[in-house]
Amino acid sequence: MVLGKVIGTIWATRKYEAVKGYKLQFVQPLNSRLENIGDPIIAVDTIGAGPGEIIFYATSSEAVIAMDVNMAPVDASIVGIVDSVNSQINSENLL
């Protein structure tokens, strides 16, 4: 799972049948210091997260597990909202 921040919502009037009923969110991936890493992605919101919230998401084939379907064309799913982050990592310990 990866940390991220919801930075926007995508509105779609037509969706693939398996993702109907789910919001699509723009998510900015974050590191443990809550700094941006990489480019934003699109994730299916399975829990009701909103813009500005820190979340964690699953990617790859595991992304579909959080949904109530067996198969869907999904690369990332939001699976939790973060209440707090307590990291002991500092810049000297990073590779």
Image (cartoon, grey):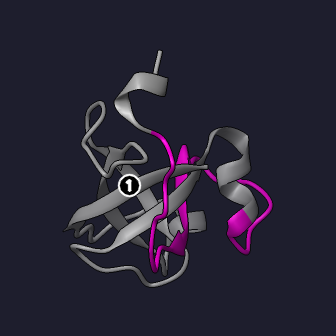
- Identify the element where label 1 is drawn: strand
In percent of width and height, residue 55 lies at 44, 66
Q: Which is nearer the eye, 34 or 88?
A: 88
On the image, the x and y values in percent for residue 50 come to: 30, 80
- Residue 58 lies left or right of residue 81; in this view the side is right
* Residue at the image point whose x is 39% and y is 79% from the top: 49
Residue beneath label 1, please? 4
Give me the residue at 32% from left, 54% from top. 27
What secondary structure characterizes most of the magenta part? Answer: loop
Within the image, what quadrant is residue 84 found in? bottom left
Residue at x 26% of width, y 44% of height: 35
Mark 1 crowd level (few <14, some 14–19, many ≥20, 10 Å Cα) = many
Identify the residue at the far right of this view: 70
Magenta region: which residues?
66-89
Please, what is the three-letter code of the amino acid marked with disc 1? Gly
Residue 48: percent from the left, percent from the top? 44, 84
Q: Is residue 53 above or below residue 56?
A: below
* Front position in the image: 53 or 17: 53
Judging depth in this view, the residue of 82 and 19 nearest the camera is 82
- Which residue lies at the image location 27% right of the left edge and 42% below the top edge? 40
Question: How many labels were placed on the picture?
Answer: 1
Q: Is residue 70 above or below residue 29?
A: below
Residue 77 highlighted magenta (yes or no): yes
Magenta span contains residue 18: no
Which residue is outermost to the top?
95
Of residue 78 and residue 11, the one placed in the foreground of this image is: 78
Residue 10 rendering spot, x and y as whole percentages: 23, 64
